[in-house]
Amino acid sequence: MATVNKQEAIIKIKQFVTDKDGQKVGAVLDMDELARVKDLLEDLLDLKYVEDRINESEENYEAYSSKRKSRL
């Protein structure tokens, strides 16, 4: 995963959508920016999966492979 500096971490909003009171209720992003944000969210999800599994016990590959083959 690539490192992101603080300036790149900011989402670049093209335009805000406001309600009748002038309150921001939405935002318009360029498609390239949307793709960048999607990639960042996928990276965060991957990190969450790693964090969730960090305390799992290790298993020998051979034992795991044998177990998988017996289920087929």
Image (cartoon, helix red, strand yellow):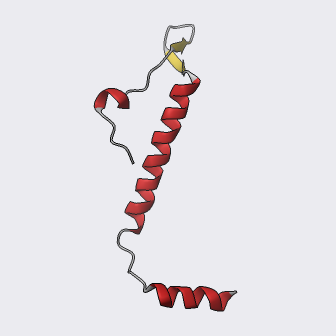
Total marks drawn? 0
Please give the name of the residue rendered at 47% of the width and 51% of the height, measured from the top-left corner: 45
> Could you tell whether 12 is left or right of 38 in the image?
left
- The image quarter in which residue 55 lies: bottom left
Q: Provide residue 7's location: percent of width, then percent of height.
A: 32, 26
Q: Provide residue 66's location: percent of width, then percent of height.
A: 56, 91
Nearest to the observer: residue 42 or residue 21 = 42
Please give the name of the residue rendered at 33% of the width and 42% of the height, measured from the top-left corner: 3
- The image quarter in which residue 28 lies: top right
Please give the name of the residue rendered at 64% of the width and 92% of the height, measured from the top-left corner: 70
Please give the name of the residue rendered at 37% of the width and 27% of the height, measured from the top-left corner: 10
In this view, 13 is above or below 51: above
From the image, which quarter does the C terminus lie in? bottom right
Nearest to the observer: residue 52 or residue 60 = 60
> Could you tell whether 50 is left or right of 18 in the image?
left
Q: Provide residue 17's location: percent of width, then percent of height.
A: 55, 14
In this view, 46 is above or below 56: above
Q: Provide residue 35's location: percent of width, then percent of height.
A: 55, 33
In this view, 29 is above or below 5: above
Q: Residue furthest right?
A: 72
In this view, 2 is above or below 30: below
